[in-house]
Protein backbone atom coordinates (compact mmCIF):
# COMPACT_ATOMS: atom_id res chain seq x y z
CA UNK A 1 0.00 0.00 0.00
CA UNK A 2 1.25 3.47 -0.84
CA UNK A 3 0.08 6.88 0.42
CA UNK A 4 0.18 9.77 -2.06
CA UNK A 5 -1.49 13.10 -2.68
CA UNK A 6 -4.78 12.90 -4.56
CA UNK A 7 -5.12 14.43 -8.00
CA UNK A 8 -8.13 15.66 -9.96
CA UNK A 9 -8.13 12.32 -11.75
CA UNK A 10 -8.88 10.66 -8.39
CA UNK A 11 -12.04 12.69 -7.71
CA UNK A 12 -14.56 10.09 -8.94
CA UNK A 13 -12.94 7.34 -6.90
CA UNK A 14 -12.77 9.58 -3.81
CA UNK A 15 -16.47 10.44 -4.08
CA UNK A 16 -17.27 6.71 -4.39
CA UNK A 17 -15.24 6.02 -1.26
CA UNK A 18 -17.12 8.75 0.63
CA UNK A 19 -20.43 7.29 -0.53
CA UNK A 20 -19.44 3.83 0.70
CA UNK A 21 -18.23 5.27 4.02
CA UNK A 22 -21.57 7.08 4.50
CA UNK A 23 -23.44 3.82 3.90
CA UNK A 24 -21.25 2.04 6.44
CA UNK A 25 -21.87 4.78 9.00
CA UNK A 26 -25.64 4.63 8.41
CA UNK A 27 -25.66 0.84 8.74
CA UNK A 28 -23.71 1.04 12.03
CA UNK A 29 -26.13 3.53 13.61
CA UNK A 30 -24.04 6.63 12.85
CA UNK A 31 -26.35 8.38 10.37
CA UNK A 32 -25.57 12.00 11.19
CA UNK A 33 -21.86 12.19 10.48
CA UNK A 34 -21.13 13.58 7.01
CA UNK A 35 -24.79 14.38 6.37
CA UNK A 36 -24.11 18.05 5.42
CA UNK A 37 -23.42 17.81 1.65
CA UNK A 38 -25.14 21.09 0.84
CA UNK A 39 -23.47 24.09 -0.71
CA UNK A 40 -22.33 26.56 1.93
CA UNK A 41 -20.84 30.01 2.17
CA UNK A 42 -18.20 31.25 4.55
CA UNK A 43 -17.51 34.51 6.33
CA UNK A 44 -13.82 35.30 6.72
CA UNK A 45 -12.14 38.07 8.72
CA UNK A 46 -15.12 40.13 9.80
CA UNK A 47 -13.96 43.33 11.51
CA UNK A 48 -14.84 46.94 12.15
CA UNK A 49 -12.97 49.99 13.47
CA UNK A 50 -15.31 50.52 16.43
CA UNK A 51 -16.95 53.64 15.03
CA UNK A 52 -20.19 51.86 14.09
CA UNK A 53 -22.27 49.28 15.94
CA UNK A 54 -24.02 46.33 14.33
CA UNK A 55 -21.52 45.54 11.58
CA UNK A 56 -21.52 41.80 12.35
CA UNK A 57 -25.31 41.64 12.32
CA UNK A 58 -25.47 43.61 9.06
CA UNK A 59 -22.89 41.32 7.45
CA UNK A 60 -24.67 38.20 8.67
CA UNK A 61 -28.02 39.41 7.34
CA UNK A 62 -26.43 40.27 3.99
CA UNK A 63 -25.02 36.74 3.72
CA UNK A 64 -28.22 35.03 4.94
CA UNK A 65 -30.16 36.65 2.09
CA UNK A 66 -27.78 35.04 -0.39
CA UNK A 67 -27.24 31.53 0.94
CA UNK A 68 -29.07 29.23 3.34
CA UNK A 69 -26.01 27.58 4.84
CA UNK A 70 -23.11 29.59 6.28
CA UNK A 71 -20.05 28.32 8.14
CA UNK A 72 -17.30 30.16 9.94
CA UNK A 73 -14.88 29.73 12.75
CA UNK A 74 -13.18 31.85 15.37
CA UNK A 75 -10.56 31.57 18.08
CA UNK A 76 -11.60 30.10 21.42
CA UNK A 77 -10.69 33.36 23.16
CA UNK A 78 -12.75 35.57 20.80
CA UNK A 79 -15.73 35.73 23.15
CA UNK A 80 -17.14 38.87 21.50
CA UNK A 81 -17.42 37.13 18.11
CA UNK A 82 -18.85 33.99 19.68
CA UNK A 83 -21.53 36.12 21.37
CA UNK A 84 -22.37 37.87 18.09
CA UNK A 85 -22.60 34.59 16.22
CA UNK A 86 -24.99 33.08 18.76
CA UNK A 87 -27.02 36.31 18.77
CA UNK A 88 -27.31 36.05 14.98
CA UNK A 89 -28.57 32.46 14.93
CA UNK A 90 -25.33 30.56 14.43
CA UNK A 91 -24.86 27.30 16.32
CA UNK A 92 -21.59 26.03 17.71
CA UNK A 93 -20.60 22.81 15.93
CA UNK A 94 -17.35 21.84 17.61
CA UNK A 95 -13.65 22.35 17.15
CA UNK A 96 -11.84 22.36 13.80
CA UNK A 97 -8.13 22.60 13.12
CA UNK A 98 -6.79 24.96 10.47
CA UNK A 99 -3.79 24.36 8.21
CA UNK A 100 -1.23 25.31 10.86
CA UNK A 101 -2.82 22.87 13.33
CA UNK A 102 -4.33 25.48 15.63
CA UNK A 103 -7.90 24.93 16.88
CA UNK A 104 -10.92 27.10 16.08
CA UNK A 105 -14.51 27.00 17.31
CA UNK A 106 -16.75 26.18 14.33
CA UNK A 107 -20.17 27.75 13.84
CA UNK A 108 -22.93 27.20 11.31
CA UNK A 109 -26.10 29.00 10.34
CA UNK A 110 -28.72 27.03 8.46
CA UNK A 111 -32.10 28.32 7.37
Image: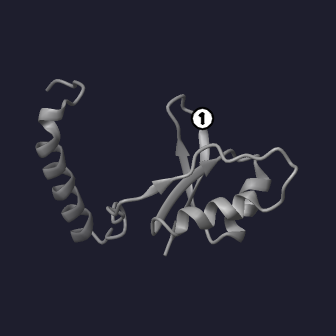
In the image: residue 36, left or right of residue 81: left
Q: Badge 1: few (under 14), some or many (20 or more) residues near its Cα, within 10 Å?
A: few
Give the residue at the far right of this rendering: 51
- Residue drawn where x is 33% and y is 66% of the image: 35
* Relative image position of residue 48 (x, y in whole percent): 77, 47
Q: Quadrant of residue 12?
A: top left
Dot 1 falls on a residue whose secondary structure is loop
Along the line of sight, which residue is nearer the eye, 75 or 21?
75
- Residue drawn where x is 45% and y is 69% of the image: 68
Check the image and tell me how it is coloured: one colour
Give the residue at the far bottom of this rendering: 111
Question: In the rendered image, which residue does mark 1 sit on?
Answer: 102
Q: Quadrant of the N terminus?
A: top left
* Relative image position of residue 101 (x, y in whole percent): 54, 32
Any part of residue 91 in sight: no
- Residue drawn where x is 59% and y is 50% of the image: 73
Using the image, determine if residue 2 lies above or below residue 15: above
Any part of residue 24 in sight: yes
* Relative image position of residue 22 (x, y in whole percent): 24, 61
Q: Quadrant of residue 7?
A: top left
Q: Quadrant of residue 25?
A: bottom left
Using the image, determine if residue 29 lies above or below residue 6: below
Using the image, determine if residue 78 lies above or below residue 5: below
Q: How many marks?
A: 1
In the image: residue 61, left or right of residue 14: right
In the image: residue 38, left or right of residue 41: left
* Relative image position of residue 8 (x, y in whole percent): 17, 34
Using the image, determine if residue 102 lies above or below residue 67: above
In the image: residue 100, left or right of residue 27: right
Amino acid sequence: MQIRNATRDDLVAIMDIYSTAREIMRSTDNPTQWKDDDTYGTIHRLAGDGSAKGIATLCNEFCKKRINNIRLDTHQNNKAMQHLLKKNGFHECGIIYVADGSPRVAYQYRR
